[in-house]
């Protein structure tokens, strides 16, 4: 019997992507089909998302959208099961990118500001398929109008990862999420929304009452967590990197809205002042933090805050910037080593993400960016970070999590989001950097999206 394979041929680009991945040419299957089928991975060694070494050879039975049983003596329940021989191969959890921009990663800024919303969604759908084909079965989206894309993926209309969306980045006037041009200033109370606001990329809110309103709006639209800009950014042209944005009172307004919905606030922040102000306002997750100092790291530890960061170093994977933005980028890159050293010293909860923005040529490096984390951590720790640790971060959304269940691990009862790797990714983590060749099987929610062994 053929494996359960999800193909979408309503759009030529997705059919092409699926064909190039050598997926089986079965008709489209939705997850209802998966509920009554079984898939057995035989003789695989397991990286379970938590251990520092692989297991011995075992069998893993998938039923429906979850892992039913694991063991050397596990067998298929009947003749109708599909069997995959995993000898000399590794079964591991699907990867999780904790800082992704599903809508904005592959869009040049000019396209983002001028294209029709329908065009943006089609381009994002193409990139969502590519994201899944790189082995990323879940992403936490930290800014962009991705609600419709997420619904399309969940409804099996589009291939892509599970998405935890933040919606629009909430920003003060002149902040990191203020995408207006200088000719839009000054604004008046009766001004129409800017292009970036109307598209849902970023929304401007000044004062606690306005922050509270905009926070509630994103939660109404389906945000699983909120994203605020707490300080200057590299890719934003009008806010210097040292600028601290928002007050404690404004952060408290967003945090109160999030907590009333059982979830949390993440903030974009690099500097000590921006991080500390956010922490005092009740923020739980700091994105980036490459310029933090020791007192800031200590405060994060005391408050149990998460350090959600990236391998921002000056290498071939750095998102290219120019002019003044390039100077800001170099400052951030120069602080990356120290930030990870402080995170390790104070035993912070560390999550990992890519934060690729506005560059369609860079998204192919999503897995390669993960491998560069071995500059600070062992390969096993890096893989744990991108699976079980990032999955723990996703679950901080509580009741707002759109996919209640166990993710990021190979355990009985966990979601069947798994990758079959041609080799041992702990001893050779570079395998993750070449997903087209080395990820032999990609499964999400019990459905096979790629099978090079077919």
Image (cartoon, helix red, strand yellow):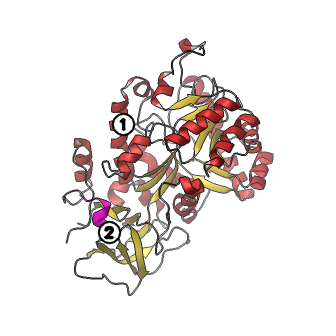
In magenta segment, residue 373: no
368, above or below 416, in the image: above
Residue at position x 21%, y 60% in the image: 24
Tell me where residue 172 sits by quadrant: top right
Can the viewer see residue 35 in this picture?
A: yes
Marks 2/1: CA–CA distance: 30 Å
For residue 125, above or below residue 1 = above
Left or right, 380 with respect to 342, comes to: left
Q: Could you say whether the residue bearing mark 2 is in a helix, strand or loop?
A: helix
> Percent from the top left, x then y, of residue 397?
57, 53
120 on left or right of 388:
left
Q: Residue at x 53, y 35 (%)?
A: 168
User: Is 31 contained in the magenta span?
Assistant: yes
The dot on residue 121 is 1
Look at the image and give the residue range highlighted in magenta.
29-35
Which label sits on residue 297? Answer: none
* Between 64 and 296, the one nearer to me in the picture: 64
Q: Is most of the magenta stretch helix, strand or loop? A: helix
Q: Mark 1, residues whose alpha carbon is within 10 Å: few (<14), some, or many (≥20)?
A: some
Q: Which residue is mark 2?
A: 35
Where residue 322 appears, as percent x and y from the top left, is 53, 26
What x and y, as percent, mark residue 46?
Answer: 45, 73
What residue sits 35% from the left and 42% below the top? 125
Query: Which residue is drawn at the image coordinates 37% and 26% (left, top)?
Result: 115
Residue 241 in which image quadrant? top right
Decide if residue 310 is on the left or right side of residue 31. right
Q: Nearer the viewer, residue 382 or 162?
A: 162
Instruction: Decide: is 418 above or below 243.
Output: below
**Mark sitting earlier along the chain (2/1):** 2
Q: Say whether residue 329 is visible.
A: no
Q: Residue furthest bottom?
A: 73
């Amino acid at each position: 019997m053929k494996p359960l394979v999800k193909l979408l041929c309503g759009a030529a680009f997705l059919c092409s992507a699926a064909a190039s991945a050598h997926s089986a040419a079965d008709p489209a299957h939705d997850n209802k089909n998966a509920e009554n089928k079984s898939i057995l991975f035989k003789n695989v060694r397991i990286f379970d998302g938590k251990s520092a070494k692989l297991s011995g050879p075992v069998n893993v039975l998938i039923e429906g959208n979850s892992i039913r049983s694991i063991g050397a003596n596990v067998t298929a329940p009947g003749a109708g099961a599909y069997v995959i021989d995993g000898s000399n191969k590794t079964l591991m959890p699907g990867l999780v990118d904790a800082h992704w921009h599903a809508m904005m990663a592959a869009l040049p800024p000019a396209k983002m500001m001028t294209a029709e919303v329908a065009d943006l969604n089609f381009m994002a759908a193409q990139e969502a398929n590519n994201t899944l084909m790189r082995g990323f079965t879940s992403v936490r989206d930290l800014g962009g109008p991705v609600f419709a894309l997420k619904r399309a993926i969940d409804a099996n209309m589009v291939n892509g990862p599970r998405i935890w969306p933040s919606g629009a980045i909430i920003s003060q006037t002149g902040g990191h999420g203020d995408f207006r041009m200088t000719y839009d200033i000054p604004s008046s109370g009766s001004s129409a929304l800017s292009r970036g606001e109307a598209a849902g990329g970023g929304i401007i809110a000044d004062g606690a009452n306005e922050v509270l309103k905009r926070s509630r709006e994103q939660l109404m639209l389906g945000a699983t967590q909120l994203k605020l800009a707490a300080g200057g950014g590299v890719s934003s042209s009008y806010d210097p990197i040292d600028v601290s944005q928002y007050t404690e009172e404004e952060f408290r307004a967003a945090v109160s809205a999030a907590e009333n919905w059982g979830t949390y606030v993440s903030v974009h922040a690099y500097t000590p002042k921006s991080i500390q102000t956010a922490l005092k306002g009740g923020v739980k997750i700091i994105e980036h933090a490459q310029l933090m100092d020791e007192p800031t790291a200590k405060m994060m530890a005391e408050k149990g805050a998460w350090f959600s960061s990236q391998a921002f170093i000056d290498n071939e994977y750095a998102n290219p910037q120019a002019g003044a933005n390039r100077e800001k980028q170099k400052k951030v890159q120069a602080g990356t080593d120290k930030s990870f050293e402080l995170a390790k010293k104070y035993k912070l909860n560390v999550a990992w993400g890519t934060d690729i923005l506005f560059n369609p040529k860079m998204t192919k490096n999503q897995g390669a960016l993960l491998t560069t984390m071995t500059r600070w951590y062992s390969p096993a720790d890096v893989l744990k970070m991108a699976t079980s640790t990032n999955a723990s971060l996703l679950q901080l959304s509580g009741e707002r999590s759109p996919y209640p269940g166990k993710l990021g691990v190979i355990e009985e009862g966990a979601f069947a989001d798994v990758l079959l790797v041609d080799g041992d990714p702990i001893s050779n983590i570079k395998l993750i950097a070449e997903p087209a060749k080395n990820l032999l099987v990609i499964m999400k929610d019990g459905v096979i999206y790629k099978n090079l062994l077919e």
